[in-house]
Image (cartoon, rainbow, N blue to C red):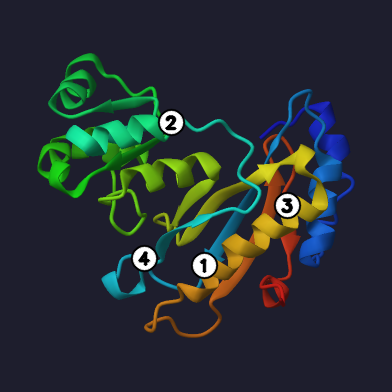
Amino acid sequence: MKHGKKYIESAKLVDRDALYEPEEALALAIKTASAKFDETVEIHIRLGVDSRHADQQVRGAVVLPNGTGKKVRVAVFAKGDAADTAAAAGAEVVGAEDLVAKIQGEGFLDFDVAIAAPNMMGLVGRLGKILGPRGLMPSPKAGTVTPDVAKAVQEAKAGKIEYRLDKTNIIHCPIGKVSFGTDKLKENYKTLVDAVNKAKPAAAKGQYIRSCVLATTMGPGVKINPAKAVLAD
């Protein structure tokens, strides 16, 4: 894989063989950001579990204290009073059968988070093959299937993110923007890593956090010492 001049220069700042302390890794990731836009800082955590087994799944959601820095577009499947409260809470799109038809017929997907009232899931279930592969399917575990749709909308807008294992047992999540600075990114990092650590399945054996890497959108990876990935309070 060929990299541009800016990436190559940024990569010189990182010791590929070193395992950094979290605070040092965050500061270094910020330093490697060289794009003209405000790059996202992402975390990639490889866990010592096997996602093929139901009792070793790791999935949940958490509200980052400083948000993600991204404007989140929310779609809500609801009717009646629930639809009204969702709209009042700031949801960009609210609907029921009409919204399902728009997604199925027109390929409408101009939203980042989908939330559904429980009585809508029979309807929303028809969209599984469309929303599922895109990570947009509402889920009780992620808090996006709930009777309190207004609260869910507010949390999504405030920076609630979902974390889940991929097929290679890695969690990929944004924790903010380079412009946040080290302190705010550290708060977001701690909130997410603590949540992942608390979600450790009882069936998991051996070392739980196997590796942890930080990277900006266009920057090189910065390895964190997995033994010190969880920050003390």
Label 2, on which residue? 90
Q: In which quarter of the image is residue 159?
A: top right
Disc tally is: 4
x and y percent of residue 187 in the render? 70, 59
Q: Can residue 152 be seen in this view?
A: yes
Amino acid type indicated by mark 3: Leu
Q: Could you give the CA–CA distance between mark 1 and mark 3, rounded to whole angstroms?
A: 16 Å
Amino acid type indicated by mark 1: Val
Q: Judge left or right: residue 137 versus residue 183.
A: left
Q: Earlier in the sequence, mark 4 or mark 1?
A: 4
**What secondary structure is found at the residue carrying circle 1?**
helix
Q: Which quadrant of the rendered structure holds the N terminus?
A: top right
x and y percent of residue 136 in the render? 34, 39
x and y percent of residue 189 in the render? 66, 58
Q: Could you give the CA–CA distance between mark 1 and mark 2, rounded to whole angstroms?
A: 29 Å
Q: In this view, does 210 lie above or below 110?
A: below
Q: Earlier in the sequence, mark 2 or mark 4?
A: 4
x and y percent of residue 83 in the render? 25, 33
**Image point (82%, 64%), residue name:** 18
Amino acid type indicated by mark 2: Gly
Amino acid type indicated by mark 4: Ser
142 or 225, nearer to the observer: 142
Instruction: Select label 4 or label 1 by which is in front.
Output: 1
Q: Earlier in the sequence, mark 3 or mark 4?
A: 4
- Do the CB atoms of the residues marked 1 and 2 lie less than 8 Å apart? no
Q: Earlier in the sequence, mark 2 or mark 3?
A: 2
Query: Badge 1 local density, few (<14 within 10 Å), some, or many (20+)?
Result: many
Q: Earlier in the sequence, mark 1 or mark 3?
A: 3
**What secondary structure is found at the residue carrying circle 3?**
helix
Label 1, on which residue? 196
**Image point (53%, 51%), residue name:** 172
